């Protein structure tokens, strides 16, 4: 079939989850972050695997993602990391969801809706300890906790914050955030809120900051087999979950001086063998990889030449013996002893591996391998 395929290795996901369990031990719960289609890996299949593995919580961005999980049969608790809109509160009650709360008006609406329904809604209070993005500002945390204490329709199940730079070698700011978070936790306990889960550790925290484990950790990227950065104190062996494959659609011998692709941005310097691949930026293979990217053909690296098109990419395979039409081509993943990682691709276009996964994961053709439910 013409086109590219994303392969998702669920056995690798299970291995990476086991490494999280090994690090945090049995007394710390795990929230698997599956927001944004599990970083492009397929939210429903990934969440099912994590639930089968006994994950204590799932983390999504919003109510829409959470409802998709519930409709897909997921029973695990689900945290709405971006919070909830007032018009979604009926869905929160219907599907047993847990919103993050960081605004006073929303907290009041949550409580009022819960009381009207004769119930209490579990929430996790999000405090900004230094990220500067989402959460109650640190200086307003005590006042916010006092307000929450007065709202009878809310049950405070969790208290969370988010590291800004735990993936950097210098941990001084992360340690400052953790110290602030512990102070806030102390204030909450003094008020009698006593959240079951306090959590701040992301993947970098899980790997490098064991003091941040507390009652719950939130691994995301490491579940998908990539390191949060290469500045970690304790590198960990993970297994990449995503592979992008295609095939040689056409081989073409061209003379020296031949322009290749839109804009003629590449011209052959010798008689060359050019392979055209049915993959392009419509598949999430970034156009910025034009004349920069590499692919694997017959266990060897081949450079991308010319501009990447919407559905086509050209590579120079002159140096690779015996290439044939329909040969497998790997753009992300392993082939033989060679491997192209999301970090390799990200480095060529000055971005991060997260974006590579999310973009490639938009590919409409995914194949899930090694499911534990098959």
Image: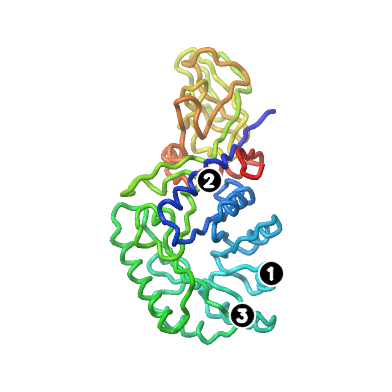
Going from the N terminus, do you reach mark 1 or mark 3 first?
A: 1
Q: Residue at x 44, y 69 (%)?
A: 198
How was the colour assigned to the protein in this rendering? Answer: rainbow
Q: Judge depth for marks 1 and 3 and give the one in front.
A: 1
Q: In the image, is residue 136 above or below residue 207?
A: below
Could you tell me which residue is drawn at 69 percent across and 28 percent down?
1
Specify which label sits upstream in the sequence, 1 or 2.
Answer: 2
In this rendering, position of residue 119 left or right of residue 340 = right
Dot 3: within a 10 Å radius of its alpha carbon, few (fewer than 14), some, or many (20 or more) residues? some
Give the structural element (helix, strand or loop) at label 1.
Answer: helix
C-beta proximity under 8 Å, tags 1 and 3: no
Select label 1 or label 2 by which is in front. 2
Residue 154, percent across and down? 57, 79
Q: Residue under label 1, please give it.
A: 91
> How far apart are the two marked residues, 1 and 2, measured between alpha carbons?
31 Å
Nearer-the-camera pick, 194 or 43: 194
Q: Quadrant of the C terminus?
A: top right
For the residue pair 265 and 293, the one nearer the viewer reads as: 293
Percent position (x, y) of residue 228? Answer: 41, 49
Query: Where in the figure is residue 38, as x and y percent of width and height?
Result: 57, 51
Q: Which residue is mark 2?
A: 14
- Please tell me in which quadrant of the rendered image residue 78 appears: bottom right
Which residue of the protein is positioned furthest toward the bottom in this rendering? 150
Along the line of sight, which residue is nearer the eye, 290 or 13?
A: 13
Secondary element at image label 2:
helix
Residue 368 left/right relative to 300: right
* Residue wearing tag 3: 109
Pointers 1 and 2 in contact (CB under 8 A)? no
Q: Tell me if residue 90 comes above or below residue 330 in the rendering.
A: below
Gap between marks 3 and 2 measured at Cα: 39 Å
């Amino acid at each position: 079939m013409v086109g590219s395929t994303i392969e998702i290795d669920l056995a690798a996901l299970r291995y990476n989850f086991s490494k999280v369990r090994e690090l945090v031990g049995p007394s710390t719960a795990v929230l698997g972050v599956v927001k944004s289609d599990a970083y492009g890996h397929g939210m429903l299949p990934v969440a099912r695997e994590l639930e089968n593995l006994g994950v204590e919580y799932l983390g999504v961005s919003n109510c829409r993602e959470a409802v998709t999980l519930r409709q897909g049969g997921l029973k695990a608790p689900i945290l709405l990391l971006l919070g909830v809109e007032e018009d979604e509160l009926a869905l929160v009650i219907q599907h047993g969801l847990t919103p993050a709360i960081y605004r006073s008006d929303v907290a009041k609406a949550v409580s009022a809706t819960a009381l009207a329904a004769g119930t209490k809604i579990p929430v996790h209070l999000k405090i900004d300890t230094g990220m500067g993005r989402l959460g109650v500002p640190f200086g307003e945390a005590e006042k916010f906790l006092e307000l929450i204490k007065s709202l009878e329709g809310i049950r405070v199940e969790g208290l969370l914050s988010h590291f800004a730079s735990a993936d950097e070698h210098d941990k001084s700011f992360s340690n400052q955030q953790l110290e602030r978070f512990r102070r806030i936790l102390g204030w909450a306990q003094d008020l009698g809120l006593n959240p079951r889960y306090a959590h701040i550790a992301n993947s970098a925290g899980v790997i490098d900051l064991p003091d941040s484990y507390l009652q719950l950790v939130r691994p995301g990227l490491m579940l998908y087999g990539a390191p949060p950065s290469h500045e970690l104190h304790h590198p960990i062996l993970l297994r990449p979950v995503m592979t992008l494959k295609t095939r040689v659609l056409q081989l073409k011998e061209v003379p020296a001086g031949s322009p290749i692709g839109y804009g003629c941005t590449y011209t052959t310097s010798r008689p060359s063998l050019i392979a055209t691949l049915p993959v392009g930026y419509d598949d999430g293979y970034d156009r910025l990889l034009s004349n920069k990217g590499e692919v694997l053909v017959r266990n060897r690296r081949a450079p991308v030449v010319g501009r990447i098109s919407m559905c086509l990419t050209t590579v120079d395979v002159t140096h690779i013996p015996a290439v044939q039409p329909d040969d497998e081509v790997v753009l992300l993943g392993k082939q033989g002893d060679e491997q192209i990682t999301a970090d390799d691709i990200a480095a060529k276009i000055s971005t991060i591996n997260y974006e590579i996964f999310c973009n490639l994961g938009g590919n409409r053709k995914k194949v899930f391998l090694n499911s534990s439910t098959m």
